[in-house]
Amino acid sequence: MFTLNSKGTLFTIEQPVVMGIINATPDSFYGGSRAATVEAALKKAGTMIEEGAFILDIGGQSTRPNSEIVGVKEEIARVIPVMEAIKNAFPNTLISVDTYYPKVAAEAVAVGADMVNDISGGRYFEEMLPTVAALKVPYICMHSSGSLEAMHQKISYSDITNALLEYFIERIEVCKKAGILDIIIDPGFGFGKLPADNFALIKNLNALQILQKPLLLGVSRKSTIYQTLGITPEESLNGTTVLHTMGLMNKAHILRVHDVKEAMQAITLYEKVYNNH
């Protein structure tokens, strides 16, 4: 389906893959994603890899609504020991660092991170894109609007699909000019978007194929699911799997998830139905 070049090593991805979420944070919205210690993160990583995760996404900053913004120093203190331990224990697993700070990205790649996952699409700090280009790793460019402080301020879109296409056309061009070779796009499910727009995103996800970039879908246990169903994040696995399945049918390439086993099951059944794998 696509290839990723990370520091000169080429990874070929022929069917949808799973990215497991590990949060080195005390306040991420879903408690099951948190790893309070390096030992807890290692255990979670081992389980996710055993269940089929192709990538592990490690972050030290919660981006849930009303979360506290932590600085570079604190994020490095949270992320780097976890990143280093996981990469040493599982050297063949791709590791992504979830950050919008250029310095955190550089420090993470120095200890083994293989790609950078940036919710800002390079908009919060102008050094981010040149930093990623110099690191020679793939870049996950997410759609969000507004400033760092206003990322969750809801916007009503007249046409969410066209808005995303315009955003990514511009961002991809900026990334290329900076020297980034491999770009993955993330529609930013839930970030500053109304539930109706989130559902429209899922329905029209296939339209983003025109960008000819791998597509990451991050819907796992998010508020559009649990608020719509009148449940909690802890009760949202079934709803997550439903949206994962719809995303796969609309050509999502990477599922960013809290629950690897169930996401892998969705991919297996999708492949059996559509690709006879």
Image: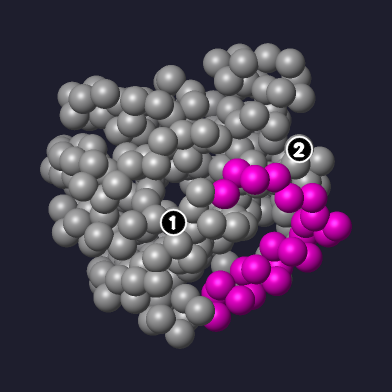
Mark 2 lies on residue: 195
Q: At x 23% / y 38%, what residue is drawn?
A: 78
Q: Work out which residue is located at the far front of the displayed protein and give it.
A: 149
Amino acid tagged 2: Pro
Q: At x 34% / y 25%, what residue is drawn?
A: 26
Q: Work out which residue is located at the far right of the displayed protein and give it.
A: 158
Relative image position of residue 262 (x, y in whole percent) = 54, 26
**How crowded is the residue under tag 1: few (<14 C-alpha within 10 Å), some, or many (20+)?**
many
| For residue 249, above or below residue 52 | below
Q: Is residue 160 magenta?
A: yes
Relative image position of residue 51 (x, y in whole percent) = 40, 29
Q: At x 61% / y 76%, what residue is drawn?
A: 170
Q: At x 19% / y 56%, what residue is drawn?
A: 107
Relative image position of residue 207 (x, y in whole percent) = 76, 62
| For residue 247, above or below residue 235 | below
Front residue of this view, candidates 123 and 161: 123
| Mark carried by residue 261 | none
Q: Is residue 31 magenta?
A: no
| Colouring used for the render | one colour
CA gap between label 1 and label 2 equals 22 Å
Q: Quadrant of residue 36?
A: top left
Mark 1 lies on residue: 118
Count of all numbered marks drawn on residues in the image? 2
Q: Which residues are magenta?
A: 150-173
